[in-house]
Amino acid sequence: MKNISNTKLILLHPYIQKQGTSNRLWLLAFMSIFTLAFLLTIIYTSGLYAYSSTTTTTISAATITTTTTASTAVPQLPTTVINTLLYYSAKSNDTFKMSYADIKPISDALRKCSTPCNFLIFGLTHETLLWKALNNNGRTVFIDENRYFAAYMEEKHPEIDAYDVQYTTKSKELKELVAVAKEQIRNECRPVQNLLFSECKLGINDLPNHVYEVDWDVILVDGPRGDWPDAPGRVMPIFTSGVLARSKKGGTGKTHVFVHDFGGEVQRVCGEEFLCRENLVEASETLGHYVVERMEESSFQFCRSRPSSNSSLSAAS
């Protein structure tokens, strides 16, 4: 039997127990406070992010609205700038330049556009950059028969939108071409149509699709050259202009069509046939100004009152 006199009894003092419990309580309290602070931080950050997102969205919407409003406005060039451009363009020594008297009516027509103006020009000429500048914020498209010159102009002036076209008619074929238009006026050569799908010999049908979808406000025929019998002449551009003007889907319903070098036989005859005398508002030896109105698809006459083809051809000869 073991002697129990050596047995030691270990007693824990109550203070020690209380001290351990107190430490655990402090630790628990600290963890609770830390957890609460962490949760409050998350809640505050989420709320701040939501507010920031809402504010950003509101600001972005306002910015978009402002930008949209600004884009719909049509800021015009100051009159002094326009007059300066016209003056120095007319003063150039280029042999084939337009005179001030010819440029001014075209400039005035561009300024009358209440919305960004759609301006189509047949011919890359001395005035190319002038037309682009005068049609400020509008759409300006150039059509030229010389593919290399069109590519050169686009490379040298990236702001220029130019396309080349292959003309298949000749100036000396004028009478035959007018006769073809008369024969097919209710079919392929009708005055209201989408030329992209037309087989009319006088129509230009190989341009990019969007050119046929635009409602052109102003059209200028200043090309191609027609100084010799085998030159392309301007039968196709004038016929095409007449169809584009009458086939408009929207806009004002009227198109200003200008024909330069108006004294030429092809220009006079085709103006009579496809742009019509009743639409001629202004004319000189060098410039004809027509205002052509939109027509219904059921229309099969270019002109309301038209002279006989023989008389117009003989008068121009």
Image: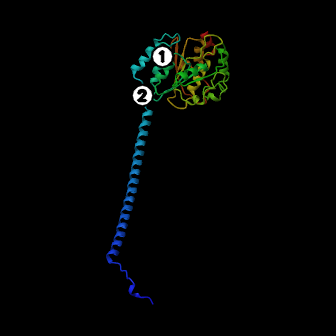
Q: Quick one: 3 or 280, which is closer to the camera? A: 3
Horizontal relation, residue 177 to residue 110: left or right: right
Q: Quadrant of residue 165?
A: top right
Q: Is 222 drawn above or below residue 215 in the view shown?
A: above
Q: Quadrant of residue 313?
A: top right
CA gap, disc 1 and disc 2: 21 Å
Residue that appears at 40% across and 43% down: 59
| Residue under pointer 2 | 75
Residue 277: image x %, image y %?
55, 18
Q: Nearer the viewer, mark 1 or mark 2?
A: 2
- Figure coloring: rainbow
Report helix, strand or loop for mark 1: helix
Q: Is residue 48 visible?
A: yes
Report helix, strand or loop for mark 2: loop
The N terminus sits in image quarter: bottom left
Q: Is residue 305 visible?
A: no
Residue 160: image x %, image y %?
52, 24
Q: Amino acid at mark 1?
A: Ile
Q: Quick one: 135 or 189, which is closer to the camera? A: 135
| Residue under pointer 1 | 103
Total of numbered circles in the picture?
2
Horizontal relation, residue 249 to residue 12: left or right: right
Residue count near mark 1 (Cα–Cα under 10 Å), binned few <14, some 14–19, many ≥20: many
